[in-house]
Image (tube, grey):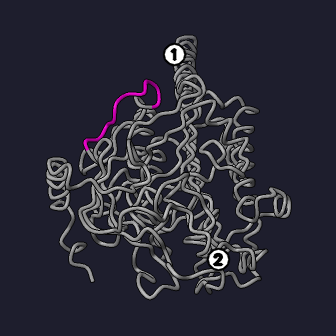
Amino acid sequence: MKSAQRIVFSFVFVFFCVQQTLLAVETKAKPNFIIIFADDLGYGDLECYGHPQFKTPHINQMAAQGARLTQFNVPVPYCAPSRATLLTGRYPWRHGVWYNPAPDGKRFRSGVGIAESELLLSELLKDNGYATICIGKWHLGHDPEYYPTRHGFDDYLGILYSNDMRPVNLMQGEKLLEYPVIQANLTKRYTERAVKFIRENQERPFFLYLPHAMPHKPLAASEAFYKKSGAGLYGDVIAELDWSVGEIIKTLRELKLDENTLVIFASDNGPWFGGNTAGLSGMKSTSWEGGLRVPMIARWPGKIPPRQVIDTVCGSIDVFPTILKQAGIPVPADRVIDGKDLFPVLTEQASAPHQALYSMKGNSLFTVRSGPWKLHVKPSPRQVLAGKGKDWIDPRGPDGVTIIAPSEQAMPDQQPGVLTGDKPEAMMLFNLQKDPAEQHNVASQHPEVVARLMKLYHEMQAEVPASIRTFK
């Protein structure tokens, strides 16, 4: 009897061990995901996108080893809505964050943020066995119910909003870690924590979301990079961001995680003063290409072919379904997901996945992009703070305590985008293939295109909730 029991026990034990081994192999095989999201990085702020002075060797190498996209769009030319779209795959009028929460602003001081009903990439990955962390700028609500740790992230290190909003509190998890913050050390600290997270979780699948503070104003670089680039403070900041990317890629290689990790580098919107749009019109907070088109690089050795330059029109709404598909997780079927799987574009240079892309400012839809055509339904200024110059006083300017180089911040005399072109007005049409700087309005020459894009506009406008459209 005892012999029979031993046989049964041995069989059960062996079965358990095999089952655990298969589970471990399956877990190990799941790909890792890293999103590095720069803040206010312009389309032309990187060397591989044509900047004449800034040197970005690590990002250049990342682009050479994967795909560099030239027509990657965000839905809003400022911070918070763009971030929520990245993490939900939904336009701002669907996920509800269509403005910037600010603890020191006249509006949206508290009680606003990402809704509990929204499903973030972090939540879906965590539910499927992923270790998750957010390091850097959150900006999806600064009240406790909106904290990253309440929305699928195991841990958090960063400032809950923009680094020019007060108080500049550095949070660890859900607790205040440091005040005041030495902003010059932010990029370094964020990078060190990111590398630590990768090392801690090398034996399991992980999702690292690294929304850097830079180059959002106030600009700040650590002593190792300050005054080293030869291209001013902005150049120092870009050089340190480039170093950060290099450290992360180096860690993946060292741990032999390189071929099992998708790394995406992008920006939340166009540049502020001192940045570069590579000849596009406008800048951050405008609906011109300089505000909406951003750099995007995707790297996955063995999966994404190297040395690709892809001109397919796509956007940050596509990151959510792309990662879920690669993780083997179904896209939520109980809500509208505006994004499309971008992997065929990254691996086969497939055609554009969208009939049209839309942008929003405030509580209104502003533009419709379809193929080479872009219709500005509402006008947007090409220049921000026109008439201001080097003597402009930033109401959220650095106080000299939280950062270094308060006198070296970029001012309105350093407009990043092209300022020429036809005067802004409603219903302007541009062929971006022929006129990427949006200089010549061709609406009168192509009424059929205007009519087609306006039909798409009205169809999407009907999906914007009345509470948003009538907000005052």
Q: Residue at x 55, y 40 (%)?
A: 297
Name the image quarter holding residue 80. bottom left
Q: Residue at x 54, y 49 (%)?
A: 266
In this orientation, does residue 42 appear?
A: yes
Q: Residue at x 65, y 67 (%)?
A: 172
271 to 22, vertically: above or below: below
As for residue 292 lying within the magenta part, the answer is no
> Which of these two is toward me, 70 or 328?
70
Crowding at dot 1, Cα within 10 Å, few <14 / some 14-19 / many 20+, comes out as few
421 to 255, vertically: above or below: below
The disc label shown at residue 169, or none: 2
Name the image quarter holding residue 48. top right
218 to 167, vertically: above or below: above
Q: Which residues are magenta?
A: 346-355
**Left or right relative to 249: residue 335:** left
Q: Which residue is mark 1?
A: 8
As for residue 353 lying within the magenta part, the answer is yes
Looking at the rendered structure, the secondary structure element under dot 1 is helix
Q: Residue at x 55, y 51 (%)?
A: 278
Sooner in the amino-acid sequence: mark 2 or mark 1: 1
Residue 390: x and y in percent read 66, 80
**Left or right relative to 79: residue 237:** right
Residue 316: x and y in percent read 43, 49
Residue 165: x and y in percent read 58, 79
Q: Amino acid at mark 2?
A: Asn
Q: Amino acid at mark 1?
A: Val
